[in-house]
Image (tube, rainbow, N blue to C red):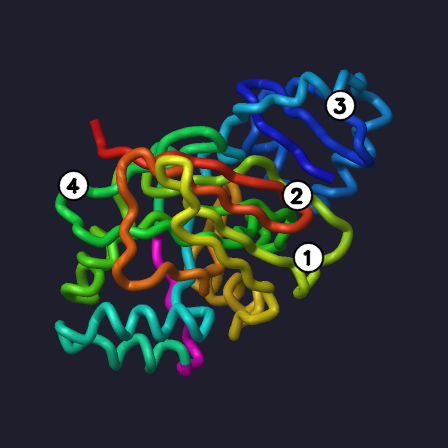
């Protein structure tokens, strides 16, 4: 089952049928225990609409939540980060965090800096090496329970991060630095470890990079990441947590203005964004 956000409306896709309801407060709507069961029960009381009315351009499924991210959760990510940080002498830190008990967790964006499906993400003008990072993203309610899943694009400057690991906030956080969507996928059970993440980057109609991976390749579990995130932080409206990536383009690739980034995750759907500079 999937829920889509569009202004004050929520569209629910379930068993190839589409429903619509109005909500006064998106944050309150999603930040509850047993979200799947709640929405399932609501279906008997809301109107069914034509599948043709499914919004092609939907809002990012975020209200006033923060977006956090986990780093170096896949071996390929560790190797890529070590490569980019060799010149600064920071490569050893990525090796250490991959094997450490404590994961790397960092603040990615507030809602202001998040865009949705079909919208533009930014790359920095002061960066020479920029990449999208396709990530399974958890929606966790204020009690610390994983209630749903969405697709995240953690746009990152590898040149800035590689220059010095202490520059991570500048490499990760800027206007339109993150995309979420197109929906929140709800399920009675945790998402399957066989779930595939796929990315395709197109430039001038030509596919520049395409790859996919199963989320079972993650070194850390979702609950482990959530436990560390909530150990010293409260999230009264819930929180989104990007869980890391191992789909890293080759070292001579960098995003350019006009590129199309398409990220697909089994069961959730496809998130499409386009690349530009900040106005």
> Residue 165: percent from the left, percent from the top?
21, 66
Is disc 1 in contact with disc 2, using a CB cutoff of under 8 Å? yes
Is disc 3 in contact with disc 4, using a CB cutoff of under 8 Å? no
Where 81 sits versus 45, above or below? below
> Residue 233: percent from the left, percent from the top?
43, 56
Write the residue at 43% across / 36% down. Answer: 273
Position of the N terminus by quadrant: top right
Where 97 sits versus 238, above or below? below
> Residue 174: percent from the left, percent from the top?
25, 42
Write the residue at 37% across / 50% down. Answer: 132
Is disc 2 in contact with disc 3, using a CB cutoff of under 8 Å? no
Disc marking residue 191: 1
Please tell me whether mark 4 sits on a helix, a strand or a loop.
Answer: loop
Between marks 1 and 2, how big is the CA–CA gap? Answer: 9 Å
Residue position marked by numbered label 4 in the rendering: 125
Please tell me whether mark 2 sits on a helix, a strand or a loop.
Answer: strand
């Amino acid at each position: 089952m999937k829920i889509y956000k569009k202004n004050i409306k929520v569209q629910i896709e379930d068993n190839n049928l589409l429903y619509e309801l109005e909500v006064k407060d998106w944050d309150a709507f999603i930040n509850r225990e047993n979200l799947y069961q709640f929405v399932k029960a609501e279906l008997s009381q809301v109107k069914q609409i034509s599948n043709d009315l499914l919004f092609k351009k939907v809002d990012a499924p975020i209200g006033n939540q923060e977006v956090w991210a986990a780093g170096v959760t896949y071996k390929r990510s560790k190797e890529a980060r070590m490569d980019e940080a060799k010149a600064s002498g920071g490569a050893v830190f990525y090796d250490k965090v991959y094997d450490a008990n404590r994961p790397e967790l960092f603040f990615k964006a507030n809602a202001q800096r998040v865009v949705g499906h079909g919208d533009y993400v930014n790359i920095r003008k002061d960066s020479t090496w920029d990449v999208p990072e396709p990530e399974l993203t958890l929606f966790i309610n204020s009690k610390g329970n994983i209630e749903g899943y969405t697709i995240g694009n953690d746009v990152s400057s590898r040149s800035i991060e590689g220059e010095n690991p202490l520059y991570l906030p500048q490499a990760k956080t800027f206007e339109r630095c993150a995309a979420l969507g197109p929906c929140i996928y709800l399920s009675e059970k945790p998402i399957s470890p066989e779930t595939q993440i796929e990315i395709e980057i197109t430039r001038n109609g030509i596919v520049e990079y395409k790859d996919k991976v199963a989320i079972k390749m993650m070194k850390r579990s979702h609950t482990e990441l959530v436990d560390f995130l909530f150990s010293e932080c409260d999230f009264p409206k819930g929180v989104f947590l990007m869980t890391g990536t191992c789909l890293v383009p080759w070292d001579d690739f960098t995003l350019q203005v006009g590129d199309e980034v398409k990220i697909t995750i089994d069961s959730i759907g496809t998130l499409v964004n386009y690349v530009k500079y900040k106005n």
